[in-house]
Amino acid sequence: MDFNLSQEQQLIQSEARRISREVLRDKAARWDLNAEVPWENIELLAKMGYMGTVIDEEYGGVGSNLMNLVLILEELAWGCVSSTLYVFANNAHGNRIQQLGTPDQKRKYLPAIANGSIIPCHAMSEPGAGSDATRIRSTAVLDGDHYVVNGTKCWISRGSVSKLFLVNVRFGTDKGADKGLLLIESGTQGFEIGKVERLMGQRGSPSTELIFNDCRVPVENRMLEGDFSSSIMSMSFSRCCNAAMGIGAAQRAFDEATAYMLQREAFGKHLSDFQGLRWMLADMKVKLDAARLLIYRAASNATGGMPSDGEAAIAKTFANEASLQVISDAMQIFGANGYSCEYPLERLYRDARAFAIAGGTTQIQRNLIARKILGRRTY
């Protein structure tokens, strides 16, 4: 068992780190302050091939794996979480189509996703179905060679800028109707973008409401392998990415706190000379390393493009909570400066806070982990 990155992985990590520090970092506050989509960064990241990291070469992607994507996302999130979310979206949802879509769907959509000309998003949450995805009420009723879609989705990340939507629906109106994924393009008649939410963090990645009113979608847009269970299983991929981005933000906070302790003085000494603060920094390092190892385990063990749902849940739960604690401790080390918008820590905390909610809350992850231990139980 080798815990060292390969030479190729080190090169991938190093290049993403360079882009993060030289390009993404300086404008991150601008996207956040103005709740502005970071189009400049999105175009650059697309040109570098990051949007198609895990998409097969035959569809214009790099043909890499989840482990390498995790390394990229972690480094990019160090500089700008909002920009990194678009790399995540194209790879996570592109991977869903690659794993669950039909050959025609792959040929039609994956090249555009890989080159960044399409930003896809996953639309699962509804006003009455968040963590409990079984309560989805949006319907797709067969009418000739089309499905007629009705329903409302909410909290759909990047909904106002996406061109392709992977929408979870019920294929029928009765209670026992099959549930699965339907591909719906922006501009389809009967489909409109609703309100854009005002967010605490990740403000360069808008969350929106989606409204379907007798929206007609061709039958060939149904993802035949994308039934409910497969759709849920595919979220393990997203959860590894989620955890990696959170740790990237936390690593930035850790690095900022380390530099601050080495230069800031109090009571005639540097902060780095006080044992209490040194121990805080040591505990932060332990959390970061432990989270990183759990993420890497899940990502490196991924087979067929999908990691174990149990390993992904463990990684997400620990990393989500560790990242928030690390950033909070960094703010404490900075004192009043940590609470100031002149420093990046408060933005990093706001950005990282969303990860413990998105992709399945940490409470839902604990249910999944317990089910892996005890088996499925009904209460």
Image: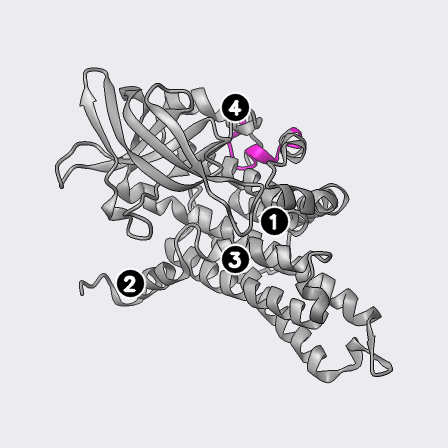
What residue is shown at x 23% (from left), y 38% (from top)? 179
Q: Which mark is residue 353?
A: 3
Q: Give how far apart the Cα atoms at labels 2 and 4 are.
A: 38 Å
At label 4, the amino acid type is Ala
Residue 298 horizontal/vertical position (percent): 47, 55
The residue identified by callout 4 is 112
Q: Secondary structure at mark 3?
A: helix
Dot in front, 1 or 4: 4
In this rendering, the answer to whether 188 lies above or below 249 is above
> Where's the N terminus, which quadrant?
bottom right
Question: Closer to the camera, 170 or 6?
Answer: 170
Name the N-terminal-most of marks 1 and 4. 1
What is the magenta range?
47-58
Using a 10 Å C-alpha cutoff, classify the residue at mark 1 as few (fewer than 14 neighbours), some (14 to 19) or many (20 or more): many
User: Mark 2 and mark 3: span between their CA atoms?
Assistant: 26 Å
Foreground: disc 4 or disc 3: 3
